[in-house]
Image: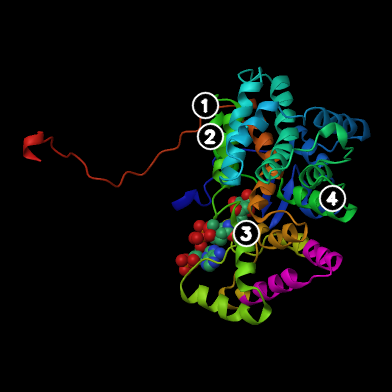
Amino acid sequence: MAGLADIVACESSICSIENSELRYRGYSIDDLAQNATFEEIIYLLWYGRLPNRLELKALKQDLAENAVLPKKIYELLHLYAPWGNAMAKLRTCLSFLTHFDDEVMDHSFAADHRKAVRIMARIAAIVAAIDRIRKGLEPIELKTIRPTSLAEMFLWLLTGEKPAPIAAKALDTCFVLHAEHELNASTFAARVTVSTMSDIYSGIVSAIGTLKGPLHGNANEQVARMLEEIGELSRVEEYIAQKIANGERIMGFGHRVYKNGDPRAKYLQALSGELAEWRDDRRWYELSLKIEKLVYEQKGLKPNVDFYSASVYTYLEIPRDLFTLMFAISRTSGWLAHILEQHENNRIIRPRAEYSGKTEVKWKGISER
Ligand code: SDX
C-alpha cells in the first residue's frame, strides 16, 4: 500500500489511535489535554504511568539541571547566525550534541534514560538560542531565571522576559497535545534509525529531518503563511476556491489516520480563541474558523493538529519559522519514548519492496550502448 498506509510495522504500548480516540499509555487525550502538564506527559510516555508528586519533582529537577548547553553550541550558531533554515539548524545542533555525551553508545536502560533527559532538557534551550543569536542577541543564562516548567523556560529564554501565565499555560497545553502520535513518519524514522543499534542522537536527528517536511510537522508554518496571505475574512472564499480549483492541498487539513477529524484540533481551536481574547485580536482566530468551515463544506476535510496551532503560536508571538521547532520540542518526548521502547526488544527494521522494474536484462559493453 503506497505510503505504508494501514500497515502495522511494530507492536507498541505507548500510544493508541482507534476511531479518532487518541490515548497516551491508555489515558485519553481529553483527560490529558485538560489536566496534565507536559512534564507529567514526558514521565507517562517514558515510564508508562503518571508520576507521583516526588517523581514529578525529581524529573523537573533533572530537566532543569540538564538544560545548560555546551558553550560550543553557541559558537556553532554564531558561525551562521543571520542565515539558514531554523529546522536545519536544530538538526545540526542535535547532531553536534552527540560529541558532548560520553554515553552515546551505551544502550543500557539507565544510560538511555539519562541521555533522554539530557536531550529533552536541551532541545528547548537550543531553539531559543537559535532565535536570539540570529537576532544578534545574547542567549539568556539559565541561572538568571526561575521557570516552573519547560514551556515557561522556553518562552523566558526566547524573549528574556518572564512569560504571562496564560502564555506559559497555553504553550504547555500545546506541548501536551503534540507530544506523541503512534507511528507518524518522524517517529517511524527514529525507530528505524535506532533499530540498527545506531545512537539515540542519530534517531532524533532522523526524526527532526522527517518532521521538517510540509506534509508533516512543517504544515503549521505553511498554515501561518496561508493566514497571512489571506489577510482578511473577505478574501477567504476566493482564496480557498482558488486552491481547490488548482487541485492544491490546503495545509492543516486531512490526516492519514483520522478520517473523522483530529481529536487534538478542538483543544487548539479553544486555545486560539482564548489567546485571541487575551491579545484583543480575533483576526487569526476568525480567519481560521472561516477557513475550517469552507474547507469542510467544499472538501469534506477537517483540521489536523497543525491548523489551529498556527494561530496559537502567532498569538504567542513565536517567530513563524520556529513553529515546526515548537512541534519538535514537544515531539522529542514521544520520539524518545519510542527509541527507549525499540531498544527494549530490538530487531532491525527492514521491510521489503514490491519490484516493478525490468527483469533479466542482458549485459552490453560500452561500445554497444
Ligand atoms: C501531521 O501521521 C501523523 O500522525 C502526523 C501528525 C502527528 O501528530 O505526528 O498528526 C502530524 O503531520 C499532521 C498532517 C500535517 N500535514 C498537512 O496538513 C498537509 C496537508 N495534508 C495532506 O497533505 C494529507 O492530508 C496528509 C499528508 C496529512 C495525509 O496524506 P494521505 O493520507 O496520503 O492522504 P492523501 O494525500 O492520499 O489524500 C486523500 C485524498 C486525496 O484526494 P484524491 O486525490 O484521492 O481525490 O484527500 C485529498 C487528496 O487530494 N486531500 C487533500 C488534503 N488532504 C488530503 N486535499 C486538499 N487539501 C488537503 N490538505
- Respond yes or no on whether mark 2 lies under 8 Å from ligand 1: no
Residue hosting label 1: 196
> Which portion, as a residue range, is magenta?
270-294
The answer to which of marks 2 and 3 sits earlier in the sequence is: 2
Q: Is residue 59 left or right of residue 22?
A: right
In this figure, which residue is indicated by the disc labeled 3? 258
Q: Position of residue 237 (x, y in %)?
A: 60, 80
What is the spatial separation of the Cα atoms under label 2 and label 1, in whole angstroms?
7 Å
C-alpha gap between disc 4 and disc 3 = 29 Å
Can residue 65 be seen from the camera position used here? yes
Tell me which amino acid carries mark 2. Val
Other residues around mark 3 within 10 Å, as few (<14) / some (14–19) / many (≥20): some
Secondary structure at numbered mark 4: helix
Q: Position of residue 258 (x, y in %)?
A: 62, 59
Q: Amino acid at mark 4?
A: Ala
Residue at x 69% of width, y 43% of height: 136
Prevailing secondary structure of the magenta residues: helix
Is 264 on the left or on the right of 245, as rendered? right
Q: Foreground mark, 3 or 1? A: 1
Q: Is residue 29 left or right of residue 4?
A: right
Q: Quadrant of ligand 1?
A: bottom right
Q: Which residue is mark 4?
A: 168
* Residue at numbered disc 2: 192
Please name which of the two marks, 2 or 3, marks the residue nearer to the observer.
2
- Whether disc 1's CB lies below 8 Å from ligand 1 is answered no
Mark 2 in CB contact with mark 1 (< 8 angstroms): yes
- Coloring scheme used: rainbow
Badge 2 element: helix
Tag 1 or tag 4, which sits nearer the N-term? 4
Q: Is residue 189 above or below residue 73?
A: below
Would you say the beta carbon of the disc 3 residue lies within 8 angstroms of ligand 1? yes
Residue positioned most to the front: 136
